[in-house]
Amino acid sequence: MHEIEESESMLNKLISRRDFLKKTAIFGAIGGLGIEGFALEPRQVAITNTNIFITGLPDDFDGFKICQLTDVHHGPLISIKFVEKVIEKANQLKPDAFVLTGDYVSSAPKYIRPVINAFGKLKSPYGTYAVLGNHDHWEGEELCIRNFKRNKIPLLTNTNAVISKRGSICIAGVGDYMEDTQELDKAFKGIPDDMPRILLSHHPDYSEEIPKDIRVDLVISGHTHGGQIQLPLLSLAPIVPSHYGQKYLNGLVKNDKTQVYVSRGIGMVGIPVRFSCPPEIAILTLRKRETALQV
Ligand SMILES: [Fe+2]
């Protein structure tokens, strides 16, 4: 009797120890994911490099590097110190030009001036071009316009800029898909048919609405933040703010109108977490499309 009681109590001890180890492992994993997602990954900025093939690209733009910064969301979760570090890193990459594709602030208008002043420190041979995102409209469109003007950064709301060497390319922009108008005719006004056309649109969903008779060679977007939380190895996110589900999660996407590059962006909204979806400085290198071999 005594022996049975003893072995039962040993068994109970073993089970409770196993239970304890199991619980420790689960809580450890959750804790680890928490530290990774809340404390580490949001500060680990990844630099991505993508070749973008464009038909008819002038020879002297083959290899032209565009650096995209988007969805910085300076505010309670993203300090100006962190933004300045990102800008310093972006300058070190020595791109030919910068594009800024919206959502620079979160939560209050007081964040607008410091973040746009920080963008004024971006240096490249062919300049910086910007459009606004939904959060910029929510916190103060006029204040954004004034600050971009003061920092001599063209805001391409339904208008364009031409970058010229011997050949030329056009960088145009449309108003935010949620809070403004998109006038593509106006955006490409005066641009010859054969000039490569790059369009800045904060929201990638607009790319699905490009009229069939207007050619756009590349759309550069942000907005989705890559979902902020992705399932490792699957490149799937539980939440993507797009009508097209996972399609415009991140990276280079081709649709039946054009090709779209969607950056994961720098900042965060909602839950202050990034998991398997680090912040991104995107380098897009323009390449001449190789012509198909004639047989
Ligand atoms: Fe955003």
Image (spheres, rainbow, N blue to C red):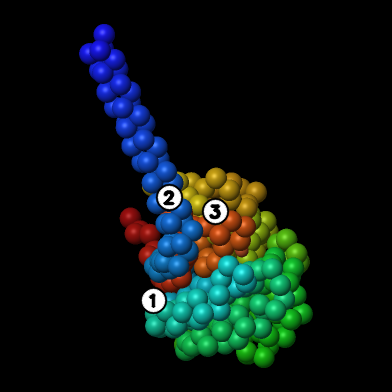
Count of all numbered marks drawn on residues in the image: 3
Camera-side residue of 281 and 85:
85
Q: CA distance from mark 1 to mark 3?
A: 30 Å
Quadrant in which residue 20 is drawn? top left
Amino acid identity at mark 1: Gly
| Nearest the eye: 290 or 145 | 145
Q: Which residue is mark 3?
A: 227
Q: Position of residue 52 (x, y in %)?
A: 44, 66
Pick the quarter of the image with the C terminus. bottom left
- SS of the residue under disc 3: helix
Q: Which residue is mark 2?
A: 31
At numbered mark 1, what does the secondary structure look like: helix, strand or loop? loop
Q: Nearer the viewer, mark 1 or mark 2?
A: 2
Residue closer to the observer: 229 or 131:
229
10 Å neighbourhood of mark 3: few (<14), some, or many (≥20)?
Answer: many
Please report the residue visible at 62 percent of the width from the left and 70 percent of the height from the top: 76
Residue 168 visible in the current orientation: no
Q: Nearer the viewer, mark 1 or mark 3?
A: 3
Q: Position of residue 141 (x, y in %)?
A: 75, 75
Residue marked by disc 1: 63
Asked whether residue 3 appears in the rendered view, the answer is yes
